[in-house]
Image (cartoon, rainbow, N blue to C red):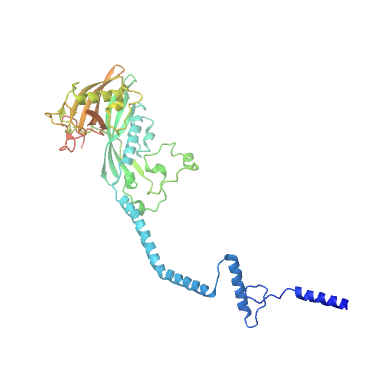
Amino acid sequence: MKRGLRLANKKQKTTEQAPPKPKATRTSRYATAPEAVPAEAVAEEETDELDEAATGWQQTTVKMAGLTKLVTVVVWIMVVAGPLLGFFAVAVASSSQAPTTTGKQGGTGSAPSATGPSGFAELYVAAYLAAGEGTEEDLLPYYSEPVTLANEPGSRSASNVVTVAAQQAEKGYWSVTVAARISAKDKAGKMKDRGMHYYRVGVQVSGTPEAGGTIDPSKTAEGPASPAASGPAPSPAQSSPAAQASPQPSGSAPAPAYRGPAALYAATSLPAEVNAPASAEHGDLAYGSDRGVSADNPVTDTVSRFLAAYLTGQGELNRYVSPGLQVAAITPAPYESTLLTGVRDDQPADSDDADAVPEDGTQRHVLVSVSATTGGQDYLLSYALTLTTRDGRWEVASFDTAPALSPDQTGPVADDSGATPDA
């Protein structure tokens, strides 16, 4: 009996300690699905539960339906707005390209430049003056016709070769006048200075307006022009095959944009020596009153001390300039001493305040002459300055870029005493 009771109690304890069966709830992964619920619904609910646990966002069928509607509305808006956005993009692109097109049209219609023909004429004249019997081939890069020279090569040489006039005789055809300082051998074979001579050259050009020609680069189908083709005729070293085949260094600037066919230049004859251009007198200046160089004049005193400090480095330069003017003495000092020789201003000759300092802020334009000494020689210089008053004294407010002209003067006046140029 005891044994049977003991077994019964043990069985009862086992029955009481057995864990209860899990309830069939939607949130339990191990719950058995009720028979009335389809398997697809259970799978969807389990997926929602997993999404909620992973992301923290609760997804429901109603919310998913609302999201679908929102996406549909956005898609329809994009479909409707597509043509409008395309039209707007085309309009913006067209407006951004308009300045470029206008610039190209303006470039083709610009006036031809005389820079190329002038440089070519200068090189031609220098080569012509140095050439002689046996070196006629030196002229072939400029003048293609064969010539026979009788002078000794190197009997003349040119320095300070510069163009003084260039005008277009016809489209693509220029008349260029070149000035050159000549040195020539005398009968003893010594080189002597022969002064300035002037030569006129006819230069024919084939190229774009930038090169002096008339070709429109937009209407040509040729390849890009070489860099040397846009200037005067290259030297033999520049046109050698090795120089043309040299690769472009790494990191160098890209090749220039194509601006039309290669520019070609050719002289139509040997140079013609002509008269110097006509001389002229400058027009009236705005400095009508001569103030002299009196030491008692405050303007003279300021200008004299300022130029002494500027040209010789002696004295405090900033003491005589207005605030804001950045100026420093010339270094090294080119002169040893200075002497003011003349002062002219733009005030009436009978001005009451000519020798007095007017109220602060008063301006006066002056043209001063100074004699600067170095190495025992005196050299004359002229300076156009603007003065202003501050704290009861005159100060230099600025260096003028050029002497001021009289208001009624528009250009130089012809000088009948000088030589007239050839027609």
Q: Is residue 405 left or right of residue 22?
A: left
The residue most toward the bottom is 36
Instruction: Please name the residue shown 32% across and 32% down the image.
Output: 326
Which quadrant is home to the C terminus? top left
The quarter of the displayed image where residue 324 is located:
top left
Q: Is residue 37 left or right of residue 388?
A: right
Q: Position of residue 327 (x, y in %)?
A: 31, 30
372 w.r.t. 238: above or below: above
Instruction: Please name the residue shown 76% across and 75% down the image.
Output: 16
278 w.r.t. 52: above or below: above
How many discs mark residues in the rendered view? 0
Q: Position of residue 100 (x, y in %)?
A: 35, 53
The quarter of the displayed image where residue 165 is located:
top left
| Frontmost residue, 189 versus 171 | 171
Q: Is residue 284 left or right of residue 238?
A: left
| Frontmost residue, 321 versus 182 | 321
Q: Is residue 267 visible?
A: no
Q: Is residue 139 visible?
A: yes
4 w.r.t. 104: above or below: below
Q: Position of residue 80 (x, y in %)?
A: 41, 71
Q: Position of residue 367 (x, y in %)?
A: 21, 29
The residue most toward the top is 376
The residue most toward the left is 350
Which quadrant is home to the N terminus? bottom right
Instruction: Please name the residue shown 37% across and 41% down the image.
Output: 231
